[in-house]
Every structure is written in structure tokens, then in C-alpha cells.
């Protein structure tokens, strides 16, 4: 894949797991809006924050100014999104590329706007297919134990597709 815009949550969980090199092996250019970068690094002592900052400093992840979308009316479907999700959706739309996002509402909004959505678990499947990770189950377990929410149905579907059920 050439280009992807990432939301904060999947980027943080990927960074906490030491998997940023896997992300950058799968995607030629990872772009994040300034708002997402701020969310990822606002508390530099949090797990993943230093890794995200280092990836930006070394050019593995590119930070761009937030893009405005065609409708920022708080009464519309965007009202339930946080600032990072909103910025990622607008940027993915502007760049006409997929968005890396896990939050259900954000995924629904992006899909309704014609944006291809990839989740962190889907990224793991692609990594396994390319032999960048040997198995997805231990990573999913680690994520869930650290408090990252992935529904049981998503985990089951990913494990089935990975041949690990």
C-alpha cells in the first residue's frame, strides 16, 4: 500500500507493541494529522508516545496540517467523533487514501464517505500474510490485556482468517 492516514488509537497500540516497523513495511507512507500527533504524544511518558515521536523525527511517519472537510457542522454525523478521528477522516478524504482506524463510529462515518477503512487487526492479518509477524493471536492478546478494546467477534474473525482459531 502506498499511503495511509492513521488515527491515534491504532497508532498508539501498534507503537506500544513495538510494531511500527511492521506498519512502515506494509505502507510506503504513513501520514497523521497534527491533531493525531498531539493526541499520541501529549503525555510522553505513556507507552507508545516516545515511539511515535521517534518515528516522526526519523521520517517513518509524516505529520501534516489538519485538513478541513466539506462539512464540519456539529449537528451532522461528525458530532460524535473526537478531534483526532475527525482530522484523520478529513485527511484521508483529501488525500484519497485509506484510513487506519478502530473506533466503530469513526469507521462507520469514514465508510459512508467512501473512505477505505483498515483496522489494526486487519493490519496484523496483512503483516502475517507477508511473514512480518509469525502469529496474530499473541499480539491481539497483548493488546486486549493492555486495555485496548477489540470485540470478541473481531478477534474471532481475525483469528479465523489468520488460521489461528
Image (cartoon, rainbow, N blue to C red):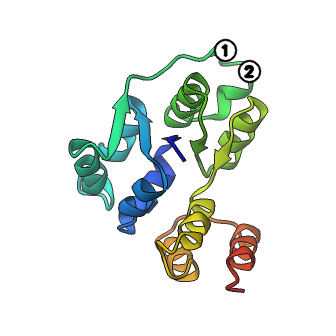
Between 8 and 3, the residue placed more toward the observer is 3
* Above or below, comparing residue 146 to residue 93 in the picture: below
Q: Residues within 10 Å of mark 2 (few under 14, many from 20)?
A: few
Mark 1 and mark 2 in contact (Cβ < 8 Å)?
Answer: yes
Q: Position of residue 99 (x, y in %)?
A: 58, 41
Mark 2 vs 1, N-terminal side: 1
Please identify, in this view, whether the residue under mark 2 or under mark 1 is nearer the observer.
1
Question: Which residue: 74% across, 76% down?
Answer: 156
* Above or below, comparing residue 149 to residue 142 in the picture: above
Question: Which residue: 61% across, 40% down?
Answer: 98
Question: Which residue: 51% across, 29% down?
Answer: 87
Between 163 and 165, the residue placed more toward the observer is 163
* Above or below, comparing residue 23 to residue 30 in the picture: below
Q: Position of residue 58 (x, y in %)?
A: 22, 46
Q: Residues within 10 Å of mark 1 (few under 14, many from 20)?
A: few
Toward the bottom, the furthest residue is 165
Q: Position of residue 153 (x, y in %)?
A: 77, 70
Residue of label 1: 71
* Above or below, comparing residue 141 to residue 114 in the picture: below
Mark identifier at residue 109: none
Q: What quarter of the picture does the C terminus occupy?
A: bottom right
Q: Secondary structure at mark 1?
A: loop
Name the image quarter holding residue 57.
top left
Q: Position of residue 134 (x, y in %)?
A: 50, 82
- Left or right of residue 19: residue 160: right
- Left or right of residue 120: residue 61: left
Between 50 and 116, the residue placed more toward the observer is 116
Question: Which residue: 66% across, 40% down?
Answer: 106
Residue of label 2: 76
- Left or right of residue 101: residue 28: left
Label 2 to label 1: alpha-carbon separation: 8 Å
Amino acid at each position: 500500500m502506498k499511503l495511509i492516514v492513521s488515527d491515534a488509537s491504532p497508532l498508539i497500540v501498534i507503537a506500544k507493541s513495538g510494531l511500527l516497523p511492521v506498519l512502515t513495511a506494509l505502507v510506503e507512507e504513513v501520514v497523521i494529522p497534527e491533531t493525531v500527533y498531539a493526541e499520541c504524544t501529549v503525555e510522553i511518558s505513556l507507552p507508545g508516545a516516545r515511539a511515535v515521536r521517534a518515528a516522526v523525527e526519523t521520517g517513518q511517519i509524516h505529520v501534516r496540517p489538519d485538513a478541513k472537510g466539506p462539512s464540519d457542522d456539529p449537528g451532522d454525523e461528525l458530532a460524535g467523533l473526537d478531534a483526532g478521528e475527525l482530522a484523520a477522516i478529513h485527511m484521508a478524504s483529501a488525500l484519497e487514501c485509506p484510513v487506519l482506524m478502530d473506533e466503530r463510529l469513526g469507521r462507520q462515518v469514514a465508510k459512508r464517505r467512501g473512505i477505505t477503512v483498515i483496522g489494526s487487526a486487519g493490519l496484523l492479518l496483512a503483516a502475517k500474510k507477508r511473514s512480518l509477524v509469525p502469529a496474530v493471536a499473541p499480539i491481539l492478546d497483548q493488546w486486549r490485556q493492555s486495555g485496548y478494546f477489540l470485540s470478541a467477534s473481531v478477534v474471532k474473525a481475525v483469528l479465523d482468517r489468520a488460521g489461528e482459531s
